[in-house]
Image (tube, rainbow, N blue to C red):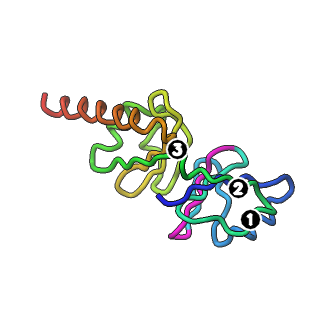
Amino acid sequence: MGPVTSVAPFAGQDGALAAALAPLAFPAPNSISSDGAARLVWTARGQAFLIGAAPGDWGQFAALTDQSDGWACLTLSGSGAAEVLSRLVPLDLRAMAVGSGARSSLGHMAMILIRGADGFEIMVFRSMARTAWHELEAAMKMRAARQVC
């Protein structure tokens, strides 16, 4: 996953930040901007996470906060990934386009969900990683049991 930095533009600095971010763009809600190496993922109104690269010299345009140690990322992929995840997430995963993201919940935990070509990246608070793993494991077992019947 690499470094994770919260980027929140200062009032009146949206245009200057946009120029500094190029070729990335500050993402609209539930979207992601990517340049191949780094991604900007929308996380809240006026906030995005820069994932995979250190921020540039953007401190004059935005509040930058290192979040790297606070988040864990799990990947769920394969033909049953959406079915497993749909047991835990209150989103219509069929409507999520590849390359989109959403801030939602996984069971009772806050998460950031990123749709990839073959599955999902699930970012949860690091302190909740074991619980998230357990919830996903239980959902996978329930799906597997239904396949046997």
x, y percentage for residue 59? 76, 62
x, y percentage for residue 128? 46, 35
Residue visible at 46% across and 34% down in the picture = 106
Residue at mark 1: 58
**Helix, strand or loop under label 1:** loop
Cβ atoms at labels 2 and 1 below 8 Å apart: yes
x, y percentage for residue 71? 51, 46
Neighbor class of circle 3 (other Cα within 10 Å; few <14, some 14-19, many 20+) is many
Residue visible at 42% across and 43% down in the picture = 94
Is residue 55 shown above or below 68?
Answer: below
User: Which mark lies nearer to you, 2 or 3?
Assistant: 2
Q: Amino acid at mark 2?
A: Leu
Q: Earlier in the sequence, mark 2 or mark 1?
A: 1
Residue at mark 3: 112
Residue visible at 40% across and 35% down in the picture = 132
Residue at mark 2: 64
Q: CA distance from mark 1 to mark 3?
A: 23 Å
Q: CA distance from mark 2 to mark 3?
A: 18 Å
- The stretch of residues the image draws in magenta is 35-44
Q: Amino acid at mark 3?
A: Ile
Q: Amino acid at mark 1?
A: Trp
Q: Main secondary structure of the magenta part?
A: strand
129 horizontally vs 44: left or right:
left
Q: Earlier in the sequence, mark 1 or mark 3?
A: 1
9 horizontally vs 148: left or right:
right
**Helix, strand or loop under label 3:** strand
Q: Which mark is residue 149?
A: none
Q: Quadrant of residue 85?
A: top left
Residue 100 in the magenta stretch? The answer is no
